Image (tube, rainbow, N blue to C red):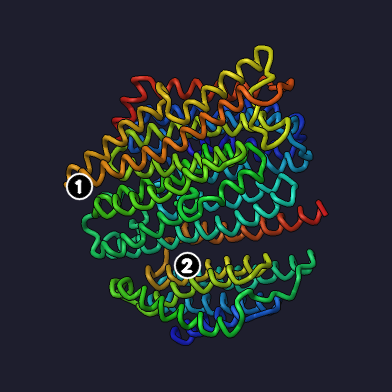
Amino acid sequence: MIYLLVLPAVIMLILSFWSVNRSKYILPITSLLILFPSIKLFFLPKPYSIWGDYLVADDLSAYIMLVSSVVAIGVTLAVSTLGLHVKISDASYSRFYRFFAIFWIGLTLSIMANNMGIYWIGLETATLSTVYMIKTNSTPLAKKEAWNYMIVGAIGISLILFGIILIYASAKPILGEEAMIFSSLLEHAKEIKSPFLFEIGFAITSLGMFIKMGFFPMNLWLANIERASFYPVAALFSGILESAVIIGFFRFSKIAVAINPLHVFLFVFIYTVLTIFIVSFLIYRAKDFMRLFSLSGVEHMAIIALFWASGGVFAALLHFGAHAFLKPALFLSTGILESKGKYKIAGALKGYSGIKGKAFYFLTTLFLLAIISLPPSPMFFSELYGFGAMVEIAKKHQHLLLMIGAIVTLLVLLSIIFYKFVEVYQSMKYEGKEEARVVYGNEVLALVIFALSLVLLMTPWSFEFLRAVS
Amino acid sequence: MTSFLIGLFLATLITALFTMRLYRLILWYSLNSLSLALLAITIGYNIDDNTMIISGIFTLILKAMLIPYILKRVSLKFGLSRQISPNVAVHYSIILIPALLVFTFYLAEPITNMIASNTNFVAISISALFLSLLLMIEHKNIAPKIIGFLMIENALFLLETTATSGMPMLIELGIFLDLLMVIVIINLLFKQEEEVA
């Protein structure tokens, strides 16, 4: 199974040494191969061992693997016309594919990992390969941001390892080397003799993950990096990298909840509310698509973490899936919207003609409105269920009024974001001059894949599956 | 012996914070890694843990010899500035570094109480982490930042050696492999900058 999971990435790695003009048309087809093992994972008895205790598939990893695979297919499809929107040399194009392949292998390891060490190794590999993907854009800004990513990403990843070591130290006296295994840790969480040490480890690991997702106080670093790099990098960040980071948070927090649920909730609640508070105002001031979508990504990841910590697992997973499909779709659209002049929001949706143009117009509008949780967007339902979970947890600990106050504050902050997106949409549609714009078939196809995935996410079968995970 | 080596580890790190020349900084990094490698081999020998001895040998070859050699080659090849003045003035650093050490010992006290062996070493590894972060923060040039990151890796290795008596071998190998990838990426980043120029 492991060979099948990494096969498309390995093919991409091999083809990256070949002529890019030919391989860029083959890769979207070979990337489809990932669907077979990803779908097969759903039908295998769980937990299913892929590689001993190191890589084990359960419902959560199967779901996140499928979501990431769809994103990888969509991005591979859209990358084939990257050269038509931006200036990129053949050598850089090949290197982009090479490091995309390494990134993909790293994240597959992280998503399927049942071992804290393997999870970290996968994440580190992905982080390092991203540095070079940022650098494929040869502007001075991209150069600066690649180094920034290298440094800040390394600090984030080091904090994660630091926390893992403390967690391992807390559980090693009772579990030995099995203290590295997520499932063993979860099973024996209550027996850990120094829960404080575990909680410190969890807090530091979470801090590292939060830095990687752009949470408080590192709110702008991701937006700056995504602005400086080519748009598929931002799509990969939001669709796959953040999926791998959040699955780590899910796994660590599940163990921490078994030790002390209230501590986890309070820690995540304070951190995420603070993040949303700052990010909502940053979104309000955003002046270009890339920063707008990037900051909105930070807001959504904070919401997912908050719902998860509140016990709203179904809401968190639904929100996660919707975000993982919507955000890469919007980032890929950005490449097309900005190809006639960067930072120009006014009139960005004008000038699309023909079937492909109209389809692009329709899908981009759909994604823009869906990301701000307009019904019937999956985000609308996930937020309803998520806030419901927050009320339930408040009832249990008898601080309902405080929680309602917090939810109202969150809704006010979310309404600021809602207002900004509506303003942007109206400006794109009604303001500015109309200029003829070009959209390519594979880009529309990538957006169609994301739209269909969103529709599938809303089916009763998906809901039933996500409820079973929780 | 272990106390001497850990003292040497901390001393090389503190000296690196005051260094203003790149090659000298690479040398301090190499000595820092050497003391770490000897520490891992000594602790591994004392507790009869072959995995830790192998990790120590890997550290010796990779971090004390290979990486400093590659870093020096890279800095020569790409003509990196050898003058690396820290942003924090020396007289402030003299106050800041001991304050950071004392603060870390105080901060790590509840954790060290929970770890059976090498309790002071855990506090030292956490302080090494903070000092390495300081090294990254106090320099504008990219090369000291890279060395700061590599020293963070050393601090984490010290923490895992002292707090957990070593991680499983496969994980250790993975971490070493990632470290090699860091060096490859750094080399590529510099190389492409040269191509663009």
Q: Chain of mark 2?
A: B
- Name the kind of residue labelled 2 in the image: Leu
Measure how far apart labels 1 and 2 are at the Cα level: 40 Å
Look at mark 2 in the image and give the residue it sits on.
B156
Q: Residue under mark 1: which chain is it in? A: A
User: Given the image, on which type of amino acid does mark 1 rest?
Assistant: His
Q: Nearer the viewer, mark 1 or mark 2?
A: 1
- Answer above or below: position of B102 versus A268: below
Dot 1 surroundings within 10 Å: few (below 14), some, or many (20 or more)?
A: few
* Residue displayed at 66% across by 21% down: A350
- Image quadrant where residue A172 sits: bottom left
Q: Position of residue A6 (x, y in %)?
A: 54, 38
User: Which disc is residue A399 wearing?
Assistant: 1
User: Residue, x 33% and y 27% (percent of image)?
Assistant: A465
In depth, the one of A38 and A415 nearer the eye is A415
The extreme front residue here reads: A431
Q: Secondary structure at mark 2?
A: helix
Q: Is residue A220 shown to the viewer in this render?
A: yes
Please identify the quadrant where the C terminus of chain A is shown.
top left
Q: Label 1, secondary structure: give it.
A: loop
Q: Quadrant of residue A136?
A: top right
- Between B32 and B101, the one nearer to me in the picture: B101
Q: Position of residue B58 (x, y in %)?
A: 55, 68
User: In the figure, A334 relative to A199: above or below?
Assistant: above
Question: In x, y percent, where is residue A386?
Answer: 32, 36
**Viewer-proximal residue among A155 and A121:** A155
Residue A27 visible in the picture: no
Q: Is A327 left or right of A360, judged from the image as shown?
A: left
Of residues A256 and A29, the one drawn nearer to the viewer in this rendering: A256
